[in-house]
Structures are given as C-alpha cells and as structure tokens.
Image: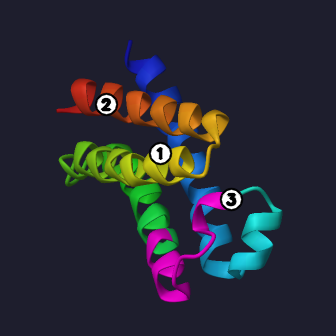
C-alpha cells in the first residue's frame, strides 16, 4: 500500500508542479490557450499566487517523507492542494466545463487518499 501512496503522491506532485510552473511563468492568455481555462478573468497576481502555492505544495508532498523530517507537512500539503480543487471545480462548473470538473474532483479524491494514509 505504501508504494501505491508514493505513486499517487508523485503523480499529484507532478501535476501541481507542472501547473504551478506554467502559472508562474506564462500570462493568462497563454494559459487559456494551453487549456488552463480556470484562470481566465483572474487577476495576474492571483494566478501567480496560485502557481506558487502549487509549486510549494508539490514539493511538500514529496520532500518531507523523502528526507524523513517534518513529515506532517505532507498531509498538510495534500489538504491545501485538495482545497485548491474546490474553487477550481466551481469555476469550471460555472463555465460549463464538465470534463475539467471531473478532473478537479479526481485530484481532490487522490489528495484525500494521501491525507488519510499519511496522517
């Protein structure tokens, strides 16, 4: 089971690292063209803030358990990243993007699994 949780953590860390780097590097128009439609209409600083949170969260999902220090940060990171999915799903629902809502819910479920097994 531990191996499965590590795989899920790696997958979620990769997803959020990729998304976070994109949000901190690209502008809103480019992000929307790349398929990250949830940022459309958000303030530039807020997009960068979300991206930074996603990067930090992805590091906190892996690093504490890897170095065996501050391991409580891993479930806390999963809580925070899962929480990001709630307004993201709401935004996509408002924009009538059901596939993106399903992805947000799936990520939230995986984060919940990580929280459960890492607490």
Which residue was labeled with disc 3?
Answer: 36
Q: Is residue 44 magenta?
A: yes
Residue at the disc numbered 1? 89
Residue plotted at (40% across, 36% down):
108
Residue 70 horizontal side relative to residue 102, left or right: left
Tell me where residue 20 appears, x and y as whole percent: 57, 65
- Residue 59 x %, y %: 44, 58
Instruction: Report the span colored magenta.
Output: 36-50
Label 1 crowd bin: few (<14), some (14–19), many (20+), radius 10 Å: many
Picture coordinates of residue 10 (x, y %)? 53, 38
Between discs 2 and 3, the one toward the N terminus = 3
Residue at 40% x, 58% y: name it.
Answer: 57
> Regarding mark 3 in the picture, which secondary structure is present there?
loop
Secondary element at tag 2: helix
The alpha-carbon separation of the residues under discs 1 and 3 comes to 12 Å
Camera-side residue: 32 or 55?
32
- Of 100 and 95, nearer the camera is 95
Marks 2/3: CA distance?
23 Å
Q: Earlier in the sequence, mark 1 or mark 2?
A: 1
Judge whether residue 82 is colored magenta: no
Q: How many marks?
A: 3
Residue labelled with disc 2: 112
């Amino acid at each position: 089971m531990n191996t499965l949780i590590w795989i899920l953590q790696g997958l979620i860390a990769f997803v959020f690292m990729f998304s976070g780097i994109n949000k901190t590097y690209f502008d809103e128009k480019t992000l929307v063209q790349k398929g990250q439609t949830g940022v459309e209409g958000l303030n530039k600083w807020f997009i960068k803030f979300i991206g930074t949170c996603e990067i930090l969260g992805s590091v906190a999902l892996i690093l504490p358990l890897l170095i065996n220090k501050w391991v409580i940060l891993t479930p806390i990171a999963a809580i925070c990243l899962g929480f990001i999915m709630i307004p993201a799903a709401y935004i996509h629902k408002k924009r009538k993007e059901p596939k993106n809502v399903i992805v947000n819910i799936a990520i939230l479920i995986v984060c919940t699994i990580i929280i459960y097994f890492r607490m």
